[in-house]
Image (cartoon, rainbow, N blue to C red):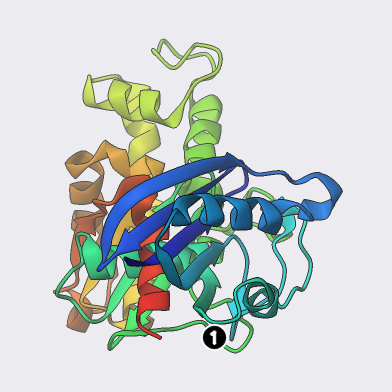
C-alpha cells in the first residue's frame, strides 16, 4: 500500500499521521525536543515515519512548521530553536524518491479544513487559529497564499488597539493576538476582575473557564468575552475588506466555545465590515488537532 506522511510540528509536541487515499490510518505523537536548537527534531520525525511505514511504500511527506515558509524553505521557527533551514533538501536527502511539501503550520491547518473539514466545497477561505497565540492561513481560488517572505496570513499581528496597548511577542504593541488568543482572554480577565465579585477570582484561570462562566451568567466574564469578540470581529472585518473570502474559519482551542463564540463574532462583523463583504460566512473548524496533519498530507498529495 502506498501512503503519505502528514506531519505537524508544534512547540510542545509533534504529530505524524499515516494517510492512504486521504484517509488517516494511524498516528504517532512525539515530544518536541528543542534542545540544541531543535537539532534532533527531524531525526525524531524520520524515525516515526519509518516506524509507521511497516511494509508499505512511502510516496510523499508533508510538514507543517511553526514559522514562515517560502518555496519549501523555512525562514525561521524560533519556538523550536530553528533559524533558516532548507527543510525540503533535508527531507529529500533522507527520502530521495518521495514528494515533499513544506508549509507553515497555520497554512497546513487551513488546507486541512478546506480539503477535509468544515470548509470543504469552498475555494477562498481565511482561517484563524485561536490558541496560545493567533495564527492564520489564506487560500484564494484554491491557491495557498504564502507571500513574498512566507508571512501571508499573520493575522494575529493586525493592530486592533491604540491606547494602553499590550506588548506583543513580535515586538510590536496592540496586536490582535494579545486580545483574542487564549492568553489574551485570561489577561483581560485578570484586569477586569480586580475588586469585583466574580467567579473569575481564582488562581490558574483558563480561557475555557472564562467562556463557561460567561455562559453561566457571570457579569465580569461576559464583559471579557464581549471585549474579546469586539477585537476579533474588528480583525476579521479588516481581513475580509482586503481579501474578500467566501468564509472565515474559527479554529484552535478557543473555538471550542462553539456557537456562542461564532455567533457573537459574526454579528459584530456585520457592523464593522465593508458592505460588499457582508455575505462572508463564519464557520467553526471541525478537524481539531488533526487539521495540521491533514493539510500537510494534502499539500504533498497535490504535488
**Camera-side residue: 86 or 83?**
86
Number of numbered tags placed on the structure image: 1
Coordinates of residue 67 in the picture (x, y in percent): 62, 65
Quarter of the rendering containing residue 90:
bottom right
Residue 267 image point, x, y percent: 18, 55
Foreground residue, 39 or 291? 39
Query: Please, is residue 4 above or below residue 11 in the view?
Result: below
- Which quadrant: the N terminus? bottom left
Q: Nearer the viewer, residue 93 or 221?
A: 93
270 horizontally vs 74: left or right: left
Image side of residue 130 versus residue 46, left or right: left
Q: Secondary structure at mark 1?
A: loop
Nearest to the observer: residue 165 or residue 254: 254
Categorize mark 1 by other alpha carbons within 10 Å: few (<14), some (14-19), many (20+).
few
Residue 300: quarter of image: bottom left
Above or below — where is 63 with respect to 41? below
Q: Where does label 1 land, which residue?
A: 147
Q: Position of residue 88 (x, y in %)?
A: 63, 78
Image quadrant in which the C terminus is located:
bottom left
Spot the residue most to the right. Answer: 36
Q: Is residue 88 left or right of residue 244?
A: right
Amino acid at each position: 500500500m502506498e501512503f503519505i506522511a502528514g506531519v505537524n510540528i508544534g512547540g510542545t509536541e509533534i504529530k505524524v499521521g499515516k494517510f492512504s487515499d486521504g484517509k488517516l490510518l494511524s498516528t504517532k505523537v512525539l515530544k518536541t525536543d528543542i534542545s540544541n536548537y531543535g537539532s534532533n527534531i527531524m531525526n525524531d520525525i524520520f524515525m516515526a515515519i519509518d516506524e509507521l511505514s511497516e511494509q508499505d511504500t512511502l510516496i510523499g511527506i508533508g510538514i507543517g512548521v511553526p514559522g514562515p515558509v517560502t518555496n519549501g524553505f523555512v525562514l525561521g521557527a524560533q519556538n523550536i530553536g530553528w533559524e533558516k533551514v532548507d527543510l525540503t533538501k533535508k527531507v529529500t536527502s533522507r527520502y530521495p524518491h518521495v514528494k515533499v511539501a513544506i508549509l507553515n503550520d497555520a497554512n497546513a491547518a487551513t488546507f486541512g479544513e478546506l480539503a477535509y473539514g468544515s470548509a470543504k466545497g469552498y475555494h477562498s477561505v481565511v482561517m484563524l487559529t485561536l490558541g496560545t497565540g493567533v495564527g492564520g492561513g489564506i487560500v484564494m481560488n484554491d491557491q495557498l497564499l504564502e507571500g513574498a517572505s512566507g508571512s501571508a496570513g499573520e493575522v494575529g499581528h493586525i493592530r486592533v488597539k491604540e491606547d494602553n496597548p499590550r506588548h506583543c511577542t513580535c515586538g510590536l504593541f496592540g496586536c490582535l493576538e494579545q486580545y483574542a488568543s487564549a492568553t489574551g482572554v485570561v489577561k483581560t480577565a485578570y484586569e477586569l476582575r480586580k475588586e469585583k465579585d466574580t467567579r473569575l477570582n481564582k488562581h490558574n484561570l483558563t480561557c475555557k473557564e472564562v467562556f463557561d462562566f460567561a455562559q453561566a451568567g457571570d457579569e465580569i466574564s461576559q464583559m471579557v468575552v464581549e471585549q474579546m469578540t469586539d477585537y476579533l470581529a474588528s480583525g476579521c472585518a479588516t481581513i475580509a475588506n482586503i481579501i474578500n473570502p467566501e468564509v472565515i474559519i474559527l479554529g484552535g482551542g478557543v473555538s471550542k466555545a462553539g456557537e456562542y463564540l461564532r455567533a457573537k463574532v459574526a454579528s459584530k462583523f456585520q457592523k464593522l465590515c465593508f458592505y460588499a463583504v457582508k455575505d462572508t460566512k463564519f464557520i467553526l473548524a471541525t478537524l481539531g488537532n488533526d487539521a495540521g496533519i491533514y493539510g500537510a498530507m494534502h499539500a504533498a498529495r497535490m504535488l
